Image: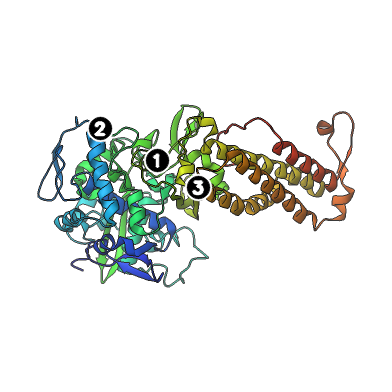
Amino acid sequence: MESYNLITEPWIKVLDGKTNSEHMVSIKELLQNASDYRQLAGEMHAQDLAILRLLEAILTTVYTRVDQNNEEYEWVTLDEQMHVQSYDDEIEGSTLLQVLTKTWNALYKECIFSEAVFDYLDKNKGLFDFFGDRPFYQVTAEQYDSFVPDNKKIAKGSGTVDLMQINRLISQSGNSVAIFAPKSANRKNKLTLDELVRWVITYQNFTGVTDKTKVKAKEKMSNSRGWLYTLNPVYAQGKNLFETLMLNLLLFNPNKPAYTQQRPVWEEDLGEYVKRRLSQVKPDNFAETYTVWSRLLHIEWQDGTPTIFSAGLPAFDSANAYDIEPMSTWRMNKKDENYYPATRQLSSIGIAMWRNFGQYVDIEGHTESREPLTVAWLNYLKTKNKLLNQQMINLHTSGIISNGGATSLMPAAEFDDNLRIEADVLFDETEDRKNAWPQRIEEMVDLNQEVGRKYYGFLMEVGRIRFGPQGAADFAGRKSQTFYDNLNEPFENWLANLSGGDDRDKQQELWKKQLKQIALRTLDDFLEIIAPRDISGIKADKSQSGTKSTESNIFIAANKYRAGINKALNKNQNIEGKGDRDGI
């Protein structure tokens, strides 16, 4: 195969905005008609996110070098390929902010990307070919052999990764069989060319650690997992693909505007890139982070069949990387007081976004998390740029959760969720920050969690009645999700219906009434089916009832739960947000 250029060949799946039908388009066609497409529509939501970040890397690279009229900014000098030759790193932040915001506004107003991005793609067409001298997201055979030990060179035939492992819908390695795969056994190891492109990009972002081949290094190193695999992603989803791309198009860091050269991986000199990765230097720009490699991949073709060789690169330090990774939530490690990506675990798969509301927006006095740059950018557009007033913000999360196995980190589950809220609510400018909407919402989130813990306590008591002390926790853990299943949609609707001008006290009281109804209805549903043992009950533990031993049965436990609900709802003081909510 001589050429398969991603700029002109159709390989990205999208949904048509009018017909909702699926189309396959090239990068150029997608960017030319982004307003006509509802969203990306690949095999997985996680794959869509990986491709979204690739597209954002292209746009960020172009529009931090030239404006909407294809004019170079005064602080950069470009070559014929529109690559940066030199730049003035002393450009004032206020000037940078004004000029780049003007470019962003012009694009957003026109609802179309300017010719500048297509000029860049045309001038860099050779860097986007899946074959050739610089195969996209891959290395050549000579390059691969130069970076791996002699016993791992291509001629030795080791260090390969099957297509069914690259395909994250299957993720089958040679050591374990994916029984419930979406493809039959004789089709697992087959992909069309467009599928292969999508999965190679996805694999670089969501790589496990089952492959053992590594690049040569002076010091001992471990293979990294895909960078996106370590995140709890968050991004803004617009009403069409153009709006999604624009809302996530950060042309500068809104917290500290300064010019940084954007360096997507396809512009990098491979030797320098590997050298920097071996030294574990953290990226300093968005485009590099969006396109960071976890593996050097080389594809050998024989009779149209690919064999993929993979060599691991080390990870860079993720501590306090919030200035170069816009699309993640961050959680403080109390031991070193650094912020790290809030990686999702299997235990948190059923936890809706609203339960971690404080991780997505800056809340007064909340230091356990750090506001994602994507959200800070939306805040800038709302408060400084006077956009998004009274518009709905749709914060979205997508990703893959690993099995947690230190020697594999194989994909175990995919997650996808969203949080809809009015911009005037999310970025409430009320001077009294304790009375601002984010703080008030956080109080309601805490209240929901407290009532949820009361229900868990009720289930623990029922579990002790039915199964004894050793089986109670397992029973409560399995059944407690019902409370949140009943709560998620009503609370998400309450959030979505809030507006900046609402009476905060009134809205909180309305939610408290609804919360009580849901909590009691959940109890009533549970009590519809009870066993004789639930009624006869058991003797309560003396440690829980003082020196006097009392009877405990399901009705006593239910009354305690009802009393606990009333106590939680009748608290007069504000509830402060407290840390990580990824538990019951």
Q: Check disc 1 and report its element: helix, strand or loop.
A: helix
Q: Could you tell whether 237 is left or right of 551 in the image?
A: left
Amino acid type, mark 3: Gly
Q: Nearer the viewer, mark 2 or mark 3?
A: 2
User: Closer to the N terminus: mark 2 or mark 3?
Assistant: 2
Q: CA distance from mark 2 to mark 3?
A: 47 Å
Q: CA distance from mark 3 to mark 1?
A: 38 Å
Amino acid type, mark 2: Ser
**Image location (x, y in percent) of residue 417:** 50, 53
Amino acid type, mark 1: Asn
Residue 286 vs residue 475, the one in the foreground: 286
Other residues around mark 2 within 10 Å, as few (<14) / some (14–19) / many (≥20): few
**Image location (x, y in percent) of residue 5:** 22, 63
Mark carried by residue 379: 1
Q: Check disc 2 and report its element: helix, strand or loop.
A: helix
**Image location (x, y in percent) of residue 338:** 44, 30
Residue visible at 25% across and 57% down in the picture: 155
Residue 296 visible in the snapshot: no
Q: Height in image: 472 above or below 256?
A: below
Other residues around mark 3 within 10 Å, as few (<14) / some (14–19) / many (≥20): few
Residue 525 visible in the snapshot: yes
Q: Quadrant of the C terminus?
A: top right
Mark carried by residue 94: 2
Q: Could you tell whether 419 is left or right of 58 in the image?
A: right
Mark carried by residue 405: 3
